[in-house]
Image (cartoon, grey):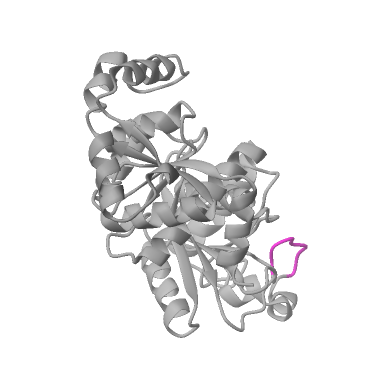
Amino acid sequence: MSVLEILNNKAKLNPQKVAFPEGTNEKIMQAAYECGKEGTIIPVLVGNREELKQLAIERGYDASVFTFVDLQDEAYQNELIQKYVSLPNTLLKEKALRRRLSDPLNFALVMEAVDEAAATFAGIDTTTGDVLFSAQQIIGMKPGISNISSIGLCDIPNYEGSEGSLLAITDSAVATNPTAEELANIAISACDTMEALLDWEPRCAMISYSTLGSGQGELVDKVAQAVKIANEKRPDLAIDGEFQLDAAIKPEVAAKKVKKASKVAGKANILVWSNLDVGNVAVKLIQTFGKANAYGPMLQGFNKVVCDCSRGAPVAEIKGNIVISALRAAGAKHHG
């Protein structure tokens, strides 16, 4: 059974409401419809209700699969605003929030903030910068986490790691050159993400060109400091390093190179790169030479699940990321 089949089956057990502020987009509507029809999510299209309903019918879809939310529904707007302003620690006051609700992305995020939706899925018609900015303003960051990052899930043929062919990698898309503090936050976020998504016991390795002081340099120092910060912040998580890649995932190499007790060495299921140069090259190598399917990038660090979809993504990839978003949201509720 493929990883997507496993994820789909899991999502069907507890389908979540996913808000789509770009529902008029043909690929988004198709992916949302197919996921809804398959029972992996409850798709909520946000915008002009009549336009969305008409488009669905014209495209040959059963409109009853969707929930349509109208931006112009004043009663619902007022209900959302009152719920939102009563939340603790929100950044926006009533007047500023009301102005923003003319935009479908902001409307969907407010719905999510007040638990009218479990996740927001956007990005195909909206820039990454706009998605990140709106999510920071409306959803906010997780307590103790100050930076946004992303994580990918790789399904690598013939790889036999601690989770079979699966390996989580971060960050290959967002954080350019994270500080030690930011790197620690990325590791913590990654552990929480994978526990929520796949019920993993996270074993997170901070990757470097050095294993526990075998090399020297600023990058090594940064990674070693990040491990220390992460362990101080979340002693409940297994985050260790700095490790070279082989020492992180190969037990026989870890046995030679890691001369201390470690829950992570040789059996890591999450790898944290030191910067985006490493992360971007690494994911391309895994895909090109390892023939891996890479799912994501999944945004992390926010209080709730927000997905920034790649503009060029085909429908099949969009569907995979929709299901992942829904599962993360369901898992976060379960674990949180």
Q: Position of residue 284 (x, y in %)?
A: 40, 76
Residue 48 seen in this snapshot: no
Which of the two residues, 237 or 12, is positioned nearer the viewer here? 12
Q: In screen coordinates, is 228 left or right of 103? A: right
User: x, y percentage for residue 86?
Assistant: 44, 14
Q: Is residue 15 visible?
A: yes
Residue situated in front as seen by the camera: 125 or 302: 125
Above or below residue 53? Residue 284 is: below
Is residue 296 depicted above or below 48 in this figure? Answer: below
Residue located 23% across and 51% down the image: 125
Q: Is residue 272 magenta?
A: no
Q: Give x and y (percent) for residue 89.
A: 44, 20
Vertical placement of residue 200 versus 163, above or below: above
Q: Is residue 150 left or right of residue 237?
A: left
Picture quarter with the N terminus: bottom right
* Residues rendered magenta in the picture: 259-265
